[in-house]
Image (cartoon, rainbow, N blue to C red):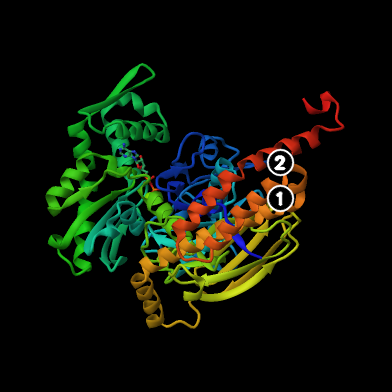
């Protein structure tokens, strides 16, 4: 009833990794991403920026890119910017400065709803449709179900708005690992948590909203010191201002619909980066906008954003000298003069090298990966395992499966096999501690895996899975892979140990590392010696008399005696030498056995059965 290890956890770990994602559920656009050493964004029709739009027709509900394609269709109700009313009551919305084009009705409990085709949709319903769409895109791409998600929300969202976001996720079958503030997500994407301390301003200029947050970093955790913003200030306002300017300067545009001119304005704006002017052709007429005119148009809007930054810093009780960096987030920060103006005004470094559209989803994906335990290097905000965990293998050795200081939760697998022919049971003894020998570690519990089908030693594959959840609960299961028979046990790993017990165990292990390694090598060579003795004795019993002469049997037995004697000693190199010698001297026997088994396989079969 003993074990031999035959594979390393690193080999099978990938299959066990949880599939977790970060979701930036934006007002204009949403993104879904995963992070495993690098960022992977999932796309809707080749675009990772997925419009937060739901279009409802008589027959169908379209979401994302397809929903925006249906925008001009008269028979379709297009719902955009739903995030603006997330978690608000009907009365709250009546008090907003300006209302969107959403046709809202007052439903039960003062809940605002959109009525389409005799059905009512709340903000939670619409958001959950967007989330289901995002989930679907990622799951289809990976061909896996999502185990959990980190979803970002504005720092100013109150409890009701946060709860509404969680409910939307629940409706779409997403397990929320954590809601994360959008500015904190951006800071994580830039790796700012690796700073010792520092204060940062997140400047988030999106499609319809402008948000500023001042964050401070203390002991690896970001605290939001203040937030400010304008929920009616964004790229849309820039588009409107350019539209006005275009109509004043190009009279032929007077016959065009405002929505159409606004689309031209938006493309002029978006193609302005790093250029002196941008222009386009409209039905044979050229419209063009110079950089200078563009700056004149947007100046009042930019100045308003800078005033809000100043207010947020004042409110955080810091001054601009305390700010280490300003981080740019949101599509509208692509306007290139924003960076230079901010640098000049606040005299600090402005970070914009991560795509401002993706930086929030990027940070959320990193956070999801950390929370799931997939990202081993980063131990931010996480608990770690105080002592290594493993199982006892043949010879009283501890085989570590999860090493000390690994962030939890985590799931790892090692594969083992049997030591003896026909072995039908395995004892799994769970060991905690750093030492090499089981007798110097703690046993946390044991269980038996039964009904292993009879096979030769080394034949069965037994997968042993260790899983520790976020609360530190360990479950260990063992599965024999051909039959799928499995057994398991649940324990609390640090149970009964105080902080000083743990420190003592680690100290002991450091002090005895060298002795332990010598002992481990000795034990391993003894195990290997016993395996060789066992295999040869079994073989001699089976066919020794048929395949060997008496002298040959005596010679093999002599060699076996020598090996048996060596394993009673304490020198691993002597044992290793003896093993090599026995294997060399019995090589001819192994060869004869192979030939004979091929012969017996061929016997009684026609040539066609064999070739
Ligand atoms: P939200 O956070 O509100 O969902 P985004 O961060 O996706 O919004 O930003 C969308 C806005 O970014 C739109 O108004 C879009 O026109 C603007 N935008 C995208 N690219 C550029 C660009 N190159 N220059 C200026 N504005 C841009
Ligand atoms: Mg955004």
Residue 585 figure quarter: top right
Image location of residue 157, percent across then percent down: 40, 64
Image location of residue 501, percent across then percent down: 41, 81
- Residue situated furthest front in the rendering: 551
Residue 413 figure quarter: bottom right
Front-most of residues 63 and 513 = 513
Vertical side of 268 occupied by 567: above or below: below
Image location of residue 405, percent across then percent down: 40, 66
Kindly tell me whether residue 112 is visible in this rendering.
no
Q: Residue at x 17, y 50 (%)?
A: 349
- Tell whether 281 sits left or right of 573: left
Q: Residue at x 54, y 75 (%)?
A: 443
- Tell whether 209 sits left or right of 40: left
CA separation, marks 1 and 2?
A: 9 Å
Kindly tell me whether residue 610 is visible in this rendering.
yes
Q: Which label belongs to residue 593?
A: 2
Residue 183 figure quarter: bottom left
Q: Quadrant of the N terminus?
A: bottom right
Disc 1, disc 2: CB below 8 Å?
Answer: yes
How many numbered circles does the render carry? 2
At mark 1, the secondary structure is: helix
Q: Residue at x 40, y 76 (%)?
A: 505
At mark 2, the secondary structure is: helix
Q: Quadrant of the C terminus?
A: top right
Quarter of the render that holds ligand 1:
top left
Q: Residues within 10 Å of mark 1 (few under 14, many from 20)?
A: some
Front-most of residues 329 and 420 = 420
Q: Residue at x 26, y 27 (%)?
A: 278
Residue corresponding to mark 1: 539
């Amino acid at each position: 009833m003993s074990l031999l290890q035959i594979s390393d956890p690193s080999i099978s770990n990938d299959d066990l990794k949880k599939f977790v994602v970060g979701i930036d559920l934006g007002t204009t656009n949403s993104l879904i991403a995963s992070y495993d050493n690098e960022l992977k964004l999932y796309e809707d029709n080749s675009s990772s920026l997925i419009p937060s739009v739901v279009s409802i027709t008589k027959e169908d509900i379209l979401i994302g890119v397809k929903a925006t394609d249906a925008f001009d269709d008269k028979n379709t109700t297009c719902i955009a910017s739903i995030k603006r009313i997330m978690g608000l009551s009907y009365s709250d919305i009546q008090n907003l400065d300006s209302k969107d084009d959403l046709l809202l009705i007052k439903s039960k409990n003062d809940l605002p709803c959109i009525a389409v085709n005799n059905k009512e949709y709340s903000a939670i319903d619409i958001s959950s449709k967007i989330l289901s769409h995002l989930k679907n895109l990622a799951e289809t791409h990976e061909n896996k179900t999502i185990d959990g998600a980190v979803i970002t929300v504005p720092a100013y969202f109150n409890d009701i708005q946060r709860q509404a976001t969680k409910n939307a996720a629940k409706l779409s079958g997403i397990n929320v690992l954590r809601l994360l503030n959008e500015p904190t997500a951006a800071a994580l994407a830039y790796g700012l948590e690796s700073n010792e301390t520092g204060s940062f301003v997140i400047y988030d200029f999106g499609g319809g909203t402008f948000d500023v947050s001042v964050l401070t970093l203390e002991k690896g955790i970001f605290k939001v010191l203040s937030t400010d913003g304008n929920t009616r200030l964004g790229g849309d306002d820039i588009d409107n201002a350019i539209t006005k300017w275009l109509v004043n300067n190009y009279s032929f545009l007077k016959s065009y619909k405002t929505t159409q001119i606004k689309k031209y304005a938006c493309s002029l704006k978006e193609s302005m980066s790093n250029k002196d002017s941008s222009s386009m052709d409209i039905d044979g007429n050229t419209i063009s906008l110079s950089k200078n005119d563009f700056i004149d148009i947007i100046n009042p809007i930019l100045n308003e954003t800078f005033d809000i930054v100043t207010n947020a810093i004042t409110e955080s009780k810091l001054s601009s000298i305390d700010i280490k960096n300003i981080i740019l987030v949101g599509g509208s920060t692509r306007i290139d003069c924003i960076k230079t103006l901010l640098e000049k005004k606040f005299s600090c470094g402005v970070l914009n090298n991560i795509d401002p559209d993706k930086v929030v989803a990027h940070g959320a994906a990193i956070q999801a990966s950390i929370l799931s335990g997939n990202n081993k290097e980063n131990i931010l905000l996480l608990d770690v395992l105080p002592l290594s965990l493993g199982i006892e293998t043949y010879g009283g050795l501890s085989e570590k499966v999860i090493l000390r200081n690994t962030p939890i939760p985590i799931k790892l697998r090692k594969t083992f096999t049997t030591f003896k022919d026909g072995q039908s049971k395995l004892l799994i003894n769970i060991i905690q501690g750093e030492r090499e020998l089981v007798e110097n570690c703690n046993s946390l519990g044991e269980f038996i895996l039964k009904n292993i089908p009879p096979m030769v030693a080394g034949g069965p594959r037994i997968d042993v899975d260790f899983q520790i959840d976020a609360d530190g609960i360990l479950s260990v299961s063992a599965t024999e892979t051909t039959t799928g028979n499995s057994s398991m046990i649940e324990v609390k790993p640090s149970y009964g140990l105080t902080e000083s017990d743990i420190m003592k165990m680690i100290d002991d292990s450091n002090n005895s590392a060298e002795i332990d390694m010598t002992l481990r090598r000795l034990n391993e060579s003894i195990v290997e010696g016993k395996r060789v003795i066992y295999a040869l004795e079994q073989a001699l019993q089976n066919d020794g008399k048929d395949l060997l002469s008496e002298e040959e049997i005596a010679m093999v037995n002599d060699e076996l005696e020598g090996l048996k004697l060596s394993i009673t000693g304490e020198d691993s190199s002597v044992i290793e030498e003896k093993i090599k010698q026995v294997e060399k001297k019995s090589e001819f026997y192994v060869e004869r056995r192979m030939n004979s088994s091929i012969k017996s396989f061929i016997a009684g079969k026609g040539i066609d059965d064999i070739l």
